[in-house]
Amino acid sequence: MIISLHTPKAGGSSFKVLLQNHFGKSLLSDYADIPINKSFKERTKDVLKFNDNFNLLKRLEYKARRIKCIHGHFLPYKYQKLLNNKNIFFITWLREPSERLISHYYYWQRAYNENSAPLHKKVVEESWSLEKFCLSEEMENFYGKFLWKFPIEKFDFIGITEHFEDDVSFFTKNYLKGYKINNVPKKNTNPNNSGFYSDKISSELLSNIKSFHSKDYEMYEYAVEKRKDRIKSMSNILYR
């Protein structure tokens, strides 16, 4: 089984299409939690409750339903009882934090409607500026909010959004053996943007974002280094 955490605006919607094509009805879409739209107390209370109730009976239910992949917006601690199982893999994708953050802001502007989640509504209806959004308590160290009580080192695979096609190729070869991709899907991209968002803001704001989200940068840099190690290991195997 694959447990796939979709961190917003890091390629997760595109990746979901790939998973749907491969797993079909064996994919469980887990998006109901909307964790970032809840207070810290609310979202951690919810995940602890689920974790407490995630007993053998629940796991047998998943097996009976032939669930082979779970993908969505959730705190991965929710499924931590499945850790250290050789047949279960935890995966996610990370994007350069400033790029992810700015992309998130503009996505919420484009995607706003009457059914938007509470924080989404607040940002749009109160006309938050990009700077306010990027330096808000609600968005601070965004990755860290998802990885509550779940160290990044626990992931079996972390894709880097800036290398999406190459990392998708690696993932499918190693975790979806036998699955061939004709075209790598691309969903929820900004049709009005080209290049890097961070090139279009002031150096001062960019510096403030990097400082404010320093823990997210540590996670991202860890993931980038793990990717380098992975590529190096593959090269060593090829040229032995």
Image (cartoon, helix red, strand yellow):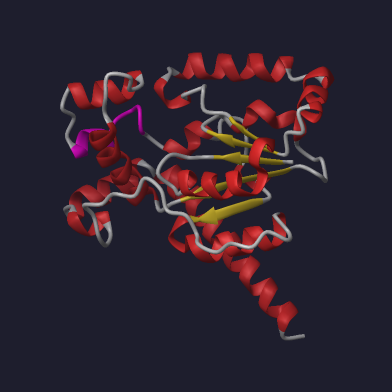
Question: In the rendered structure, which segment of residues is drawn in magenta?
Answer: 130-139
Who's the residue at 18% across and 52% down the image? 201
> Percent from the top left, x then y, of residue 110?
24, 37
203 horizontally vs 161: left or right: left
Residue 230 appears in view: yes
Residue 135 appears in view: no
73 horizontally vs 24: left or right: left
Q: Nearer the viewer, residue 186 or 240?
A: 186
Identify the image quadrant of residue 70. top right
Who's the residue at 25% across and 60% down the image? 194
* Image height of 114 relative to 91, above or below: above
Who's the residue at 43% across and 18% down the image? 38
Q: Which of 152 and 181 is in front in this view?
A: 181
The quadrant of the image that shows the C terminus is bottom right
The quadrant of the image that shows the N terminus is top right
Who's the residue at 17% across and 22% down the image? 126
> Percent from the top left, x then y, of residue 182?
55, 64
* Image height of 134 relative to 218, above or below: above
Identify the image quadrant of residue 51. top right
200 horizontally vs 234: left or right: left
Q: Residue furthest bottom?
A: 239
Quick check: is 138 in the magenta stretch? yes
